[in-house]
Image: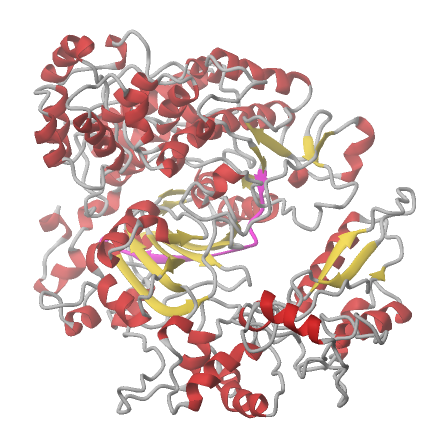
């Protein structure tokens, strides 16, 4: 056995140099391999994983024609990459400047997926262990309003009172929240909303409308708050502000102008300019409107779906003066959106281009009119639609008919040591729904405790029913157990409410993290401050983290390359391939197929979480054991999983090229040949966030989110920087493409390097169109650096590594003991709070701080060799006088 001291000394040598092509890097890479191999003799679990198996596990060899070689390798359990005719890693690995790993098991390090560079000095580092416990990595989604999501309650929700059960009570908040979903999908309605219902009842009785209360920044009724003028004064002069105010107070419907002819219409009682005299409308017109469902008692588009009773063209506009600064134009777009909550929209005036003087911005009512609480007749889109609720109330019940609830239920999900798809699959089984009925705004890390919103196409389920099913409430699991114990299998949902639409991938602002580094060692306070401030002020390289490539010995990007090359059999082989360290049940299932060729036995043994493996084998079973149609078998794997493999390959190439860019050109400023978004015509500058990856429709649908309500994908315009452009941009504007059909490659040697990677892997960099459309990707762009929105840190002391230093929302609500911080603890921990934009990996920020490989097996080795491990369980045994040596 190798001692922990020797291992620790070896770890100190593992340094990824700034020049990966030289001998130092190669030697360091080999040392890392050796150290990880030694760690297998020392491993103590960082924290007991609940079925901590990589969902996307894979294996090799499917058809009978290769059975002989498969049987030889698997029966001996000694298959190594060196024995194979072709290495499992892509051929382009040779361009990374490091040797191919030739040991078994194959442990993938950061350098193997293109991650090799740093922004700060390598000497300015903080040694520490990442994710030693699940609570060391807490993740909270940041919604589109910038609010950090937390679990707020664990109790059973209540729908509005049922007329058949008058004994039950229900507050007005439940009625409004259930029938009239607020913009904020994470928080219960506040007291202001609770006061809305009585006033809405009264207003409806008088035929009045009621103002939207979904944002405190928006005015109530016909008001124009003083801060509107203050905020707009930076962009519009007094006359234009007055014109905008006039348009806004007129409402989404343009003023009615009677021409004593066919244009005359009956004014709506909800309209601001409705007069006491009705305009006469010809009988034929009334009949036509009724027949088409555009008003009247039949409740067509106008009454039932929030549309307008007539569709007059709205020509009202306010045109700004020419604005030369892109930042000012972007700020203007943002100000209009925030002030008016989407009721007014902006666009660039393309009719009179004046590039030298700047672009003009047009402000007008949004095309949806009253869809967000305007003055028109909305259904679930504004408080005016309370008439649906009031009709029900008129019968003596505070609960609207079941069918009038919005079609979706949103809830907050906390998951522990579960990847997002695994958690959704578990929920789908408990709720008896298809997993496609569940949608999220973004995926979250597996190893940690994460909080996010989930939407469910409820199919007539109520919030009570969903809560009971999700918590598995029944004879086996009582309400008392639900309210006193943690959620089953690391899953807990709360804060359920009805909503009018589902979530879609990308509907978030980012994620907030509370990360605790254990066994921290740093040279000095100055070094600590330097390491932290580098990330705070200069950001970090926006690499795709190791989670993207899986934790098993068969990396996902290798499978992705096989799919892109239409090498179906090779892809299936890798998916079914045996890998080191798997759960015994999974190992037995693989052996049942690979060695015994017993299809039924393998299917019986494979757990449900092995989705890809089960899909392939079930397809073979339907073909009565015929394994020749491998492409068809692969097509039965859920599309999101297949796309995950391809996106992993894209991410690998992106990482490698960005490392080349940072290594050769630095990370301080743009250089000639860099790519940036081209917003010169301003039709996209209001939508482009440099911290957010611009994705195509395939990526949007990657995790089951519907894209029906999204705008059709349009490739963003990019430009290649010249010497004259450099002063206009910063390093944070520089983007790099992910390979695809609609992307441009950077100029110069970097662009050639991109093509070299793809060609070496057998791909045509100019042709990503595939016969199988689902494997054709548009490609996308991603900023090469990411700057945290917030970053702070606190040092603390501890002794027992099993004691939590942070607490999950669920544990707080259950009343569990809070974290214990020892002022005189033997070891130092660093607790980091940071907020990142979408698509950024917190582990890559930690990598910049620690300058240590973040792969799971490497971190497991560090944990095993850490000095604090000899004190495990000391806190629990301390009352019995157990010494540190006694618990070693």
Q: Is residue 301 magenta?
A: no
* Image coloring type: secondary structure
User: Residue at position x 23%, y 14% from top?
Assistant: 80
Q: Which of 774 and 439 lies nearest the eye of the viewer?
A: 774
User: Residue at position x 62%, y 83% from top?
Assistant: 209
Is residue 602 left or right of 523 when viewed as pictured?
left
Q: Which of 526 and 126 lies nearest the eye of the viewer?
A: 126
Q: Is residue 791 magenta?
A: yes
Residue 393, horizontal then vertical, whole percent: 43, 88
User: Dividing the picture into quarters, in which one does residue 569 lie?
Assistant: top left
Is residue 679 left or right of 303 when viewed as pictured?
right
Residue 678, horizontal then vertical, whole percent: 73, 37
Residue 616, horizontal then vertical, whole percent: 24, 28
Q: Which of 10 and 297 lies nearest the eye of the viewer?
A: 297
Q: Is residue 803 visible?
A: no
User: Residue at position x 38%, y 71% from top?
Assistant: 403
């Amino acid at each position: 056995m190798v001692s922990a001291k020797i291992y620790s000394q070896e770890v100190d040598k593992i340094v990824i140099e700034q020049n990966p092509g030289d001998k130092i890097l190669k030697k360091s890479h080999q040392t890392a391999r050796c150290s990880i191999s030694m760690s297998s003799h020392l491993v103590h679990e960082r924290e007991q994983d609940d079925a901590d198996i990589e969902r996307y596990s894979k294996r090799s060899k499917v058809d009978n024609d290769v059975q002989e070689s498969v049987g030889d390798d698997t029966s001996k359990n000694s298959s190594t990459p060196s024995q194979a005719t072709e290495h499992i890693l892509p051929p382009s690995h040779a361009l990374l400047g490091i040797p191919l790993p030739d040991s078994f098991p194959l442990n993938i390090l950061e350098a193997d997926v293109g991650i090799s560079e740093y922004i700060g000095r390598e000497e300015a580092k903080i040694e520490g262990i990442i994710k030693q416990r699940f609570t060391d990595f807490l993740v909270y989604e940041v919604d589109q309003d910038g609010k950090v999501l937390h679990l707020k309650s664990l109790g059973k929700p209540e729908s509005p009172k049922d007329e058949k059960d008058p004994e039950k009570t229900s507050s007005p908040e439940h009625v409004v929240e259930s029938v009239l979903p607020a913009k904020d999908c994470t928080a219960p309605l506040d007291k202001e909303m609770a006061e809305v219902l009585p006033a809405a009842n009264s207003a409806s009785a008088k035929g009045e409308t009621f103002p939207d209360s979904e944002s405190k920044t928006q005015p109530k009724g016909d008001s124009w708050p003083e801060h509107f003028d203050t905020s707009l004064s930076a962009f519009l002069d007094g006359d234009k502000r007055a014109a905008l105010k006039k348009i806004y107070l007129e409402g989404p419907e343009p003023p009615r102008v009677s021409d004593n002819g066919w244009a005359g219409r009956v004014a709506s009682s909800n309209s601001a300019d409705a007069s006491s005299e009705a305009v006469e409308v010809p009988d034929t017109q009334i009949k036509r409107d009724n027949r088409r469902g555009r008003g009247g008692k039949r409740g067509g588009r106008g009454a039932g779906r929030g549309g307008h009773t007539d569709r007059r063209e709205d020509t009202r506009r306010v045109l700004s003066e020419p604005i030369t600064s892109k930042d000012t134009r972007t700020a203007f777009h943002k100000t209009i959106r925030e002030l008016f909550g989407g009721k007014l929209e902006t666009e660039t005036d393309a009719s009179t281009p004046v590039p030298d003087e700047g672009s003009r911005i047009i402000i007008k009512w949004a095309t949806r009119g009253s869809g967000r609480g305007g003055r028109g007749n909305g259904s679930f889109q504004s408080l005016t639609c309370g008439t649906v609720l009031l009709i029900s109330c008129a019968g003596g019940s505070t609960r609207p008919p079941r069918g009038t609830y919005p079609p979706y239920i949103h809830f907050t999900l906390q998951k522990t040591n579960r990847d997002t798809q695994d958690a959704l699959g578990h929920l789908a089984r408990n709720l008896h729904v298809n997993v496609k009925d569940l949608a999220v705004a973004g995926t979250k890390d597996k190893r940690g405790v994460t909080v996010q919103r989930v939407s469910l196409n409820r199919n007539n389920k109520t919030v009570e029913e969903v809560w009971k099913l999700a918590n598995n409430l029944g004879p086996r699991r009582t309400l008392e157990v639900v309210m006193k114990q943690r959620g089953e299998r690391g899953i807990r949902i709360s804060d359920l409410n009805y909503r009018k639409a589902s979530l879609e991938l990308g509907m978030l602002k980012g994620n907030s993290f509370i990360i605790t580094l254990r066994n921290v060692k740093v040279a000095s306070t100055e070094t600590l401050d330097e390491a932290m401030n580098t990330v705070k002020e200069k950001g970090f390289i926006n690499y795709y983290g190791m989670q993207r490539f899986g934790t098993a010995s068969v990396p996902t990007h290798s499978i992705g390359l096989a799919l892109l090359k239409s090498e179906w059999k090779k892809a299936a082989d890798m998916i079914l391939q045996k890998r080191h360290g798997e759960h015994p049940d999974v190992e037995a299932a693989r052996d049942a197929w690979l060695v015994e060729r017993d299809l039924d036995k393998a299917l019986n043994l494979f757990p449900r979480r092995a989705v890809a493996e089960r899909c392939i084998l079930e397809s073979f079973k339907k073909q009565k054991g015929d394994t020749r149609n491998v492409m068809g078998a692969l097509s039965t794997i859920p599309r999101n999983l297949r796309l995950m493999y391809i996106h992993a390959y894209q991410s690998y190439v992106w990482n490698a090229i960005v490392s080349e860019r940072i290594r050769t050109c630095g990370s301080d400023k743009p250089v000639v040949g860099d790519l940036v978004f081209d917003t010169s015509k301003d039709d996209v500058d209001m939508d482009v966030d440099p911290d957010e990856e611009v994705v195509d429709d395939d990526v949007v649908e990657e995790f089951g989110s519907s894209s029906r309500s999204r705008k059709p994908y349009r490739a963003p315009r990019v430009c290649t920087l010249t010497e004259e452009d450099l002063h206009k941009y910063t390093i944070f504007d520089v983007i790099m493409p992910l390979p695809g059909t609609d992307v441009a490659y950077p100029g110069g040697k970097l662009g050639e390097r991109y093509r070299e990677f793809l060609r070496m892997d057998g791909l045509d960099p100019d042709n990503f169109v595939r016969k199988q459309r689902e494997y054709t990707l548009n490609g996308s762009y991603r900023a090469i650096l990411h700057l945290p929105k917030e970053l702070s840190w606190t040092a603390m002391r501890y002794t027992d590594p099993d004691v939590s230093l942070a607490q999950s929302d669920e544990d707080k609500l259950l009343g569990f003991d809070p974290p214990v911080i020892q002022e005189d603890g033997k070891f130092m921990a660093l607790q980091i709070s940071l907020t990142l934009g979408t698509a950024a990996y917190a582990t890559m920020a930690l990598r910049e701080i620690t300058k240590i490989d973040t792969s799971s097996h490497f971190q497991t080795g560090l944990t095993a060799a850490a000095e604090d491990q000899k004190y495990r369980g000391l806190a629990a045994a301390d009352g019995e006088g157990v010494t540190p040596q006694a618990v070693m």
